[in-house]
Amino acid sequence: MLDKLEDINKRFIEVSKLIVDPEIISDMKQYIQLNKEYKDLEPIIEVYKTYKNILSNIESSKEMLKDDEMKDMAKQEIEDLSNEKEILEENIKVLLIPKDPADSKNAVVEIRAGAGGDEASIFAGDLYRMYINFSSNKGWKTEIVDIAEGTSGGYKEIIFNVSGEDVYGILKFESGVHRVQRVPQTETQGRVHTSAASVVVMPEAEEFDVDIKDADIRKDTYCSSGPGGQSVNTTYSAVRLTHIPTGIVAQCQDQKSQLKNYDKALKVLRTRIYEMELQKKLEEDAKNRKTMVSSGDRSAKIRTYNFPQGRITEHRIGLTKYNLQATMSGDIQEFIDELQIAENAEKLKEGVGSPE
């Protein structure tokens, strides 16, 4: 383990020098990548220094064993330091799990109402507010890209960007089918109905992640049907982009400006093309080991929100909590933490990141 940490420390020193090199700074793509690597290595280096210090103290204590007067104290110190060393080694194993390069990216989130009619649209709106509150608490910025409102409130579909630190790495666990059990507003008999909404979280692709040629894009403009007043609905400000080679479509009608809508739609298009490749990797991971991140068509039921019982069940790890109101208000960090722990445990089982 120490050899592996020594190698990482050498790389950290090398990266530290590179990120202040004027030649590197002038190459934005390389500078961003090295800056990200520096940030990823920093917590490992902090633990490495502590680990090295513990090993040094153990050796010093072993020397003290030769002194009869210091023997008992030295034994106790070795025992305490060895316990510390074991705990630290477990932490190091987790830190050495290779990070998904997409984890540090911003995210594009799509929420679609599923089975359940108007109630499903209302629930999609509840999920949107849950993520907006969660993002706000994290200090992240959110921006609507496209919206299709439900007939009785909520949304048939809503797409929004989330930008901040490590957004995708945290929100990726939310992809999948979310199910709600409650008495709908429209229900007169007081019966509990089950409805669903699907959530798709994609890492936002940057320009250098996906190269899209202008000739491969077909652009269509149309009148926006969303909220925003007369000027939105009577001008061709909404934009639909089609990537001809893949058939992937992205649209935006949130802004009054066609140019702004085009930029937003292009960002989503680039993200969907990038995500198509990412899905292949996720499906490959799912074949090799159990993963907490949904892949494929995202049809897996991941979480149930039971309003009459005030209960949330996280199906992937069998976790049940009775704090429904807090959860719907955006308090979902505990679920994400538990899913991250389970994901790391599966990676460690597989031997990902284990020291040579």
Image (spheres, rainbow, N blue to C red):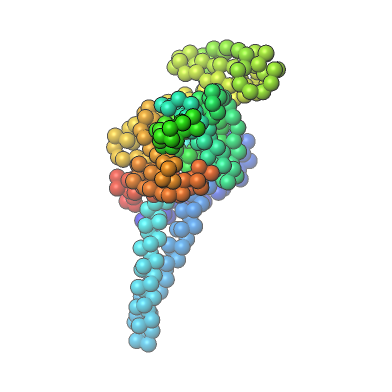
For the N terminus, the quadrant is bottom left
Residue 21 in the figure: left or right of residue 103: right
Residue 28 in the figure: left or right of residue 94: right
- Count of numbered badges drawn on the protein: 0
Furthest toward the bottom, the residue is: 69
- Location of residue 282 (image quadrant): top left
Name the one closer to the observer, 254 or 29. Answer: 254
Image position, residue 203 (x, y; %): 49, 33
Q: Is residue 266 visible?
A: no
Image position, residue 266 (x, y; %): 56, 22
- Location of residue 134 (image quadrant): top right
Image position, residue 20 (x, y; %): 61, 45
Q: Residue at x 46, y 63 (%)?
A: 50
Residue 104 in the figure: left or right of residue 94: right
Q: Residue at x 45, y 58 (%)?
A: 48
- Location of residue 278 (image quadrant): top left
Up the image or down, 10 lies above or below 129; here it is below
Q: Residue at x 70, y 17 (%)?
A: 231
Q: Is residue 171 visible?
A: yes
Up the image or down, 179 lies above or below 256; here it is below
Up the image or down, 93 lies above or below 35; here it is below
Name the one closer to the observer, 26 or 184. Answer: 184
